[in-house]
Image (cartoon, rainbow, N blue to C red):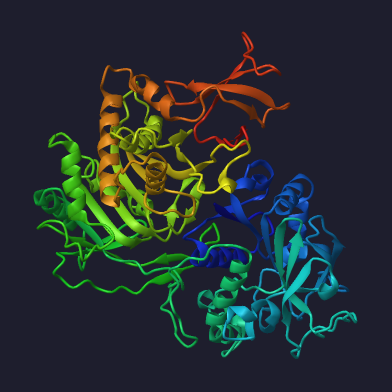
């Protein structure tokens, strides 16, 4: 499931960055935290796969301009049908029935708003000095928590300080139907005077409210509980001389995280388990993000020690000083063996990038295991020696296999895909079939530049593949199809595992039938839901006469959350059939996938010379779309079509027009869709061609 953060025009880049990073650190093990703009909210079928929609701080008027009408209608229907909405500062104003902002000044904004989650007025700013795109008006303001809401959570505090910059309060919130006040602004010097109605029994202004919206929930906040003080620079002159806003917020940073965790939990979200204990006085090193595990060393080994020695020599040739390889995106430090001490490198935070994210840079240690795989105690979550043994077994001693012969593993990494794809010279020096895998990725990469913190139990790896440019019968676009097919076939072709409900969703997703552990998990009619458990990402570069491909793959192997996993499917299958099929380990599943993919790729390039045609039957046996009727939503009027398959030249989705009864139209038009040029909502039968 996804958490979507609105990133359209008007959103403050600071608020966007803090929102994304806080959510990733607190709930990123269970949800993909992704950004979405106005066009995406309007045209993408995002509702069923979204657990929370967040509108951060910024400017309310651009939200009105870009979202009024159809996009707001989708948002309202999503929340009314059980969705969750979190509006922060400008997002809080926007989620109210009416806004009154800076009345009587040149910044004045007044008017009604369409969402109306809070059935009243949001009025501000509560404190003076607000300046757009500036920190001059920022404050560390006190808020008092509602003990009836938070008392049972035993937070350890009843009031705290959070970042504020131009936010409002929710007028008459205590008497507004369907509304609970979560926190009030404390009565502090400097607040702008606004008259409170007699219904405001606390005598305080409501800072954070929770609004019941039919079956859904909207939390609106005038303050910024998402702002992480460790990512604010106290030396910024706009904050004033120290001690200033930032130093006051740092004193309460631990409380802020506890409060935000509690709010997210009350919204029904699952919290990440890897939450570090941080005292109120502890100072994190520059660049560290609380709640996100620290990076660990990368161990490089091979199925034969001689392969590691050869690769180590190549890497040493790339070093400059102090055994360091300085690449385009990362710096790597070579450690000669597991017996040598591993240096500690201080991470630093770079300025926000163009997407509004904080980028952390830290030198990454590569431990060269030239005498054989490291001891299992050094890599307790992935036994490299065990993996190579299984690889040999699955290969059946065939010396022609290469994929996975050399492997670099880290328990906690930034992103296996980024380390290979964004460091081109390093990638060029690696052998064909080189694999990088990890147990936890804190910046895992997916399609559309999405990133997330991966959940434990997800098998995730990236692989270097050299694919000939001149193979006209074997277009590189099919590689993504082959990898996804290899994941499914590596399991379902094994004796006894044939009936496991693993399927392919075009172009590169892996789906499964959700086990019916409970009747509520079924679709209408009692059929199991189809749910995504994996996906494939392929990045390409030219290198001489070859495509240098970096293939990224992630599949839920042993984890039941956030959706289901291959092992959960096996357990359920054993339960209903009485069988006793063995579960996969990370090591065995990776070995099976790599061997199956290498077999398919060899056949694709060679075989009878017809490329994907010789694998069509196998592919269609596993995919979900044969003769499915879908609607092309970007045609005017919308057009019903039937899926016929993929073209054998460039892997386009081939569809044909049908009439109102769903029958093929003789001589009717054929529509061909690019693999990466559309959004396919299988569950609703909609295809939207992206622009």
Residue 1, above or below 227? above
In this orientation, which residue lies closer to the viewer: 224 or 171? 171
Seen in the image, is 425 located left or right of residue 515?
A: left
Q: Is residue 312 left or right of residue 140?
A: left
Q: Position of residue 155 (x, y in %)?
A: 57, 81
Residue 248 in the figure: left or right of residue 123 = left
Quick check: 563 above or below 489?
A: below
Residue 137 image point, x, y percent: 69, 78
Q: Position of residue 311 (x, y in %)?
A: 16, 51
In this rendering, is residue 185 above or below 41?
A: below
The correct choice, above or below, for 548 with respect to 520 in the image is above
Image quadrant occupied by the C terminus: top right
State whether residue 318 appears in this view: no
Left or right side of 381 for 54: right
Residue drawn where x is 37% and y is 52% of the image: 558
Q: How many marks?
A: 0
Residue sitting at x 87%, y 81% = 196
Residue 12 image position (x, y, % from top left): 64, 64
For this orientation, the residue located farthest to the right is 198
Q: Residue furthest front?
A: 578
Give the image quarter of residue 481: top left
Residue 573 visible from this viewpoint? yes
Which of the pair 355/317 is nearer the observer?
355
542 or 54, which lies in front? 54
Residue name at image x 28 percent, y 74 percent: 344
Identify the residue at horizontal 50%, vertical 86% (top origin). Answer: 280
């Amino acid at each position: 499931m996804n958490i979507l953060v609105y990133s359209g025009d008007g959103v403050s880049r600071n608020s966007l960055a803090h929102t994304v990073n806080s959510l990733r650190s607190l709930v990123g093990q269970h949800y993909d935290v992704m950004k979405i703009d106005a066009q995406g909210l309007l045209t993408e079928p995002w509702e069923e796969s979204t657990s929370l929609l967040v509108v951060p701080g910024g400017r309310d008027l651009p939200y009105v301009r870009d979202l009024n009408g159809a996009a707001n209608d989708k948002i309202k229907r999503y929340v009314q049908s059980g969705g969750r909405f979190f509006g922060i500062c400008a997002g809080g104003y926007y989620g109210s029935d009416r806004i009154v902002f800076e009345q009587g000044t040149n910044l004045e904004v007044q008017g009604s708003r369409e969402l109306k989650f809070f059935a009243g007025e949001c009025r501000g700013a509560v404190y003076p000095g607000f300046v757009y795109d500036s920190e001059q008006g920022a404050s560390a303001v006190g808020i008092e928590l509602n003990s009836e809401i938070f008392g049972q959570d035993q937070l350890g505090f009843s009031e705290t300080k959070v970042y504020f910059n131009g936010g409002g309060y929710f007028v008459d919130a205590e008497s507004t139907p369907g509304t609970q006040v979560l926190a009030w602004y404390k009565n502090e010097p400097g607040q702008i005077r606004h008259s409170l109605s007699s219904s405001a029994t606390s005598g305080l202004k409501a800072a954070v409210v929770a609004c019941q919206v039919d079956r859904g929930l909207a939390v609106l906040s005038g303050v910024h509980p998402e702002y992480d003080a460790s990512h604010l620079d106290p030396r910024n002159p706009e904050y004033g001389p120290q001690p200033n806003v930032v130093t006051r917020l740092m004193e309460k940073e631990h409380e802020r995280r506890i409060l935000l965790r509690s709010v997210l939990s009350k919204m029904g979200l699952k919290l990440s388990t890897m939450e570090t204990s941080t005292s109120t006085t502890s100072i994190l090193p520059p660049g560290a993000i609380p709640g996100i595990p620290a990076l660990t060393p990368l161990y490089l080994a091979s199925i034969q020690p001689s392969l590691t020695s050869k690769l180590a020599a190549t890497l040493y040739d790339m070093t400059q000083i102090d055994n360091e390889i300085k690449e385009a995106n990362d710096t790597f430090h070579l450690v000669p063996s597991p017996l040598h001490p591993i240096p500690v490198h201080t991470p630093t935070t770079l300025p926000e990038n163009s997407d509004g994210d904080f980028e952390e840079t830290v030198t990454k240690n590569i431990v060269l295991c030239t005498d054989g795989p490291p001891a299992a105690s050094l890599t307790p979550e992935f036994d490299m020696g065990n993996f190579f043994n299984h690889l040999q077994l699955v290969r059946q001693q065939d010396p022609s296999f290469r994929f996975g012969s050399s492997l670099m593993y880290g328990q906690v990494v930034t992103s296996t895909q980024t380390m290979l794809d964004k460091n081109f010279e390093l990638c060029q020096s690696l052998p064909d079939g080189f694999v990088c895998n990890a147990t936890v990725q804190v910046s895992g990469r997916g399609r559309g530049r999405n990133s997330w913190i991966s959940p434990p139990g997800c098998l995730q790896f990236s692989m270097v593949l050299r694919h000939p440019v001149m193979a006209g019968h074997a277009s590189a676009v099919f590689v993504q199809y082959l990898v996804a097919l290899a994941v499914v076939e590596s399991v379902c072709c094994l004796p006894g595992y044939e009936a496991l409900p693993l399927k392919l969703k075009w172009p590169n997703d892996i789906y499964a039938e959700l086990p019916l552990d409970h009747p509520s998990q079924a679709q209408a009619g009692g059929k199991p839901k189809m749910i995504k458990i994996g996906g494939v990402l392929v990045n390409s570069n030219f290198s001489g006469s070859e495509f240098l491909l970096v293939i990224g793959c992630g599949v839920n192997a042993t984890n039941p959350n956030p959706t289901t996993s291959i092992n959960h499917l096996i357990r359920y299958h054993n339960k209903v059939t009485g069988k006793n099929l063995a579960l996969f380990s990370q090591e065995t599943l990776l070995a099976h996938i790599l061997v199956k993919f290498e077999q398919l790729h060899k056949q694709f390039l060679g075989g009878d010379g017809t490329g994907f045609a010789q694998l069509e039957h196998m592919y269609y046996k596993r995919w979900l779309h044969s003769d499915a009727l879908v609607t092309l939503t970007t045609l005017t009027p919308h057009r019903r079509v039937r899926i016929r398959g993929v073209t054998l030249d460039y892997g386009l989705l081939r569809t044909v027009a049908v009439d109102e009864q769903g029958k093929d139209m003789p001589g009717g038009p054929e529509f061909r869709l690019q693999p990466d040029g559309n959004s396919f909502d299988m569950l609703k039968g909609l295809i939207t061609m992206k622009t």
